[in-house]
Image (cartoon, rainbow, N blue to C red):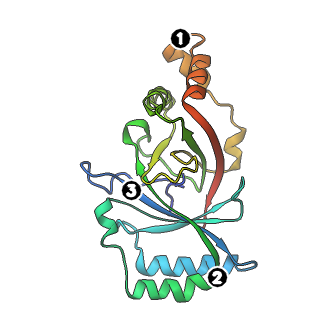
């Protein structure tokens, strides 16, 4: 599966968007998991078997696994389900599904530390036509200053216009339930490999082509005025 990383980031991240109806929110559930020492391979195998059996691709309950490989959560996994609507959460697999998860997956788990629901911000996101999703995603978890979301939205609208001109992927998701932990919004940029980070960004040049000379520094000032902090992570899809 080549998707988001919700976030396809994280969260990784790809054919999400055609699956939900236009008049309903597009939602992804994420569960952050710490596995027992030495149990990574067994955990990954158990999750794959579980997902293949109970979370088939092409459904609102499709699921996949991402590994966090940078930052304070390095070594943890994120299990993702979706995309679908909130109503699809009411019909999620249960019964035998739960027994399988408890018996075959949870025995490898040390801790479930976070369950989140992320809603896709279509007006702030851009995906090129025939976009080929990679296995890696850079995610920015952003804390928006209280009362400043309208300014943040204005900044992201300009960023989206720049991404569109460059024809480069960017997805934006907002948290459904605030936990007061600074994870208000997640921005995801999907990439094929680590080598993509070697490429020079043309964002500033493109932004100023749209908005005029010196406008990039104004964008930075506006960003700093409406955001409190960012936590950056790299997620890698587990095959």
Where is the C terminus found, in terms of image quarters? bottom right
Q: Is residue 116 above or below residue 102?
A: above
Query: Crowding at label 1, few (<14), some or many (≥20) Cα neighbours within 10 Å?
Result: few
Which numbered disc, 3 or 1, marks the residue closer to the eye?
A: 3
Question: Could you say where residue 200 lies in the image, as x and y percent from the top left?
Answer: 68, 31
Query: Crowding at label 2, few (<14), some or many (≥20) Cα neighbours within 10 Å?
Result: many
Q: Mark 2 points at which residue?
A: 108
What residue appears at the point 71 percent right and 46 percent down from the top-left corner? 195
Does residue 78 appear in the picture of this structure? yes
* For marks 2 and 3 on the same chain, the one whose residue lies earlier in the sequence: 3
Q: Mark 3 points at which residue?
A: 27
CA separation in Å, label 3 and label 1: 36 Å
Kindly give the residue lying farthest to the left in the view shown. 23
Question: Could you say where residue 30 lies in the image, as x and y percent from the top left?
Answer: 50, 62
Q: In this view, does 132 lie above or below 48?
A: above
Secondary structure at badge 1 equals loop
What residue appears at the point 61 percent right and 85 percent down from the top-left corner? 107
Question: Could you say where residue 133 lies in the image, as x and y percent from the top left?
Answer: 51, 52
Residue 212 is marked as 1
CA separation in Å, label 2 and label 3: 27 Å
Secondary structure at badge 2 equals helix
Does residue 239 appear in the picture of this structure? no
């Amino acid at each position: 599966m080549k998707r988001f990383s919700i976030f396809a980031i994280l969260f990784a991240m790809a054919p999400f968007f055609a699956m939900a109806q236009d008049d309903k929110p597009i939602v992804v559930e994420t569960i952050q998991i710490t596995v027992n020492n030495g149990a990574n391979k067994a955990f990954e195998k158990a999750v794959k078997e579980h997902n293949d059996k109970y979370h088939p691709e092409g459904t609102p309950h499709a699921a996949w696994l991402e590994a966090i490989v940078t930052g304070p959560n390095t070594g943890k996994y994120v299990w993702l389900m979706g995309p679908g609507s909130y109503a699809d959460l009411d019909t999620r697999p249960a019964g035998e599904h739960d027994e399988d998860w408890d018996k075959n997956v949870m025995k490898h788990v040390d801790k479930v530390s976070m369950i989140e629901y992320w809603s896709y911000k279509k007006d702030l996101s851009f995906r090129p036509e025939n976009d080929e999703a990679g296995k890696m995603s850079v995610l920015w978890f952003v804390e928006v200053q209280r009362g400043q979301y309208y300014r943040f939205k204005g900044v992201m609208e300009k960023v989206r216009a720049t991404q569109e001109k460059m024809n480069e992927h960017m997805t934006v998701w907002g948290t459904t339930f605030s936990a007061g932990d600074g994870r208000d919004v997640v921005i995801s940029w999907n990439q094929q490999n680590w080598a993509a980070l070697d490429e020079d960004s043309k964002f500033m040049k493109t932004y100023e082509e749209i908005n005029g000379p010196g406008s990039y520094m104004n964008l930075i000032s506006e960003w700093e005025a409406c955001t409190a902090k960012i936590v950056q992570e790299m997620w890698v899809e587990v095959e």
